Image: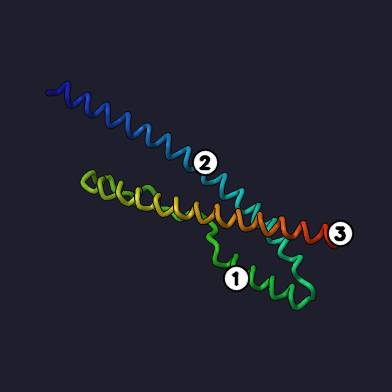
């Protein structure tokens, strides 16, 4: 019986170590993606200013972008480790919550891919218009 308990405990430890390694890969990818998104947002913001035909239009674009940036999260919201519950009775619900959150994130990534495709399409149209105008 003790051998079975030891084997079960070893299996749990293996699963948790593997999960933790996956979490670290996810975190690194998240940070990298966030950095890339901020850089592409900066570049897109600069291109959007090309639409300003006069100073009032530029003010309008700047105001819209200020409002957009004011709503953006500045840091990862997290719960300090001291507040994390080690209650194994709630493990199933915590795993279900993680799965639901990841599903929502997956949908968000699909929307991001669609938005990227639209921006690429519009950037290409702008390049063509500039070429046609001889600029």
- Residue 13 falls left or right of residue 43: left
- Residue 45 falls left or right of residue 100: right
At 78% from the left and 76% from the top, the residue drawn is 55
**Looking at this view, is 127 or 42 the one in front?**
127
At 37% from the left and 36% from the top, the residue drawn is 19
Of the two numbered discs 3 and 1 on the same chain, state the one appearing first in sequence: 1
Instruction: Please state, as top left, top right, bottom left or bottom right, where the N terminus lies in the image.
Output: top left
Determine the residue located farthest toward the right in the rendered image. 134
Circle 2: element type: helix
Circle 1: element type: helix
Q: Spatial distance from mark 3 to mark 2, Cα to Cα?
A: 41 Å
Within-10-Å neighbours for mark 1: few <14, some 14–19, many 20+: few
Q: Spatial distance from mark 3 to mark 1, Cα to Cα?
A: 32 Å
Q: Is residue 19 above or below residue 128?
A: above
**Looking at this view, is 110 or 70 the one in front?**
110
**Relative image position of residue 51 (x, y in whole percent):** 74, 68
Residue under label 3 = 135
Are discs 3 and 2 less than 8 Å apart at CB?
Answer: no
Within-10-Å neighbours for mark 2: few <14, some 14–19, many 20+: few
Residue under label 2 = 28
Q: Nearer the viewer, mark 3 or mark 1?
A: 3
At 33% from the left and 49% from the top, the residue drawn is 84
Instruction: Please state, as top left, top right, bottom left or bottom right, where the C terminus lies in the image.
Output: bottom right
Determine the residue located farthest toward the left in the rendered image. 1
Q: Is residue 108 above or below residue 64?
A: above
Number of the label disc, if any, that sits on residue 67: 1
Circle 3: element type: loop
**Relative image position of residue 70 (x, y in whole percent):** 58, 67
């Amino acid at each position: 019986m003790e051998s079975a308990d030891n084997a079960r405990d070893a299996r749990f430890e293996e699963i948790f170590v593997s999960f933790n390694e996956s979490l670290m890969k996810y975190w690194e990818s998240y940070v990298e993606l966030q950095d890339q998104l901020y850089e592409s947002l900066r570049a897109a913001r600069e291109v959007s200013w090309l639409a300003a035909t006069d100073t009032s239009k530029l003010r309008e674009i700047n105001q819209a972008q200020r409002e957009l940036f004011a709503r953006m999260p500045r840091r990862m919201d997290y719960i300090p480790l001291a507040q994390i519950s080690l209650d194994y009775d709630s493990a199933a619900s915590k795993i279900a919550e993680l799965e639901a959150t990841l599903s929502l994130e997956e949908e968000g990534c699909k929307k991001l891919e669609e938005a990227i495709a639209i921006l690429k399409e519009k950037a290409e149209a702008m390049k063509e218009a500039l070429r046609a105008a001889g600029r």
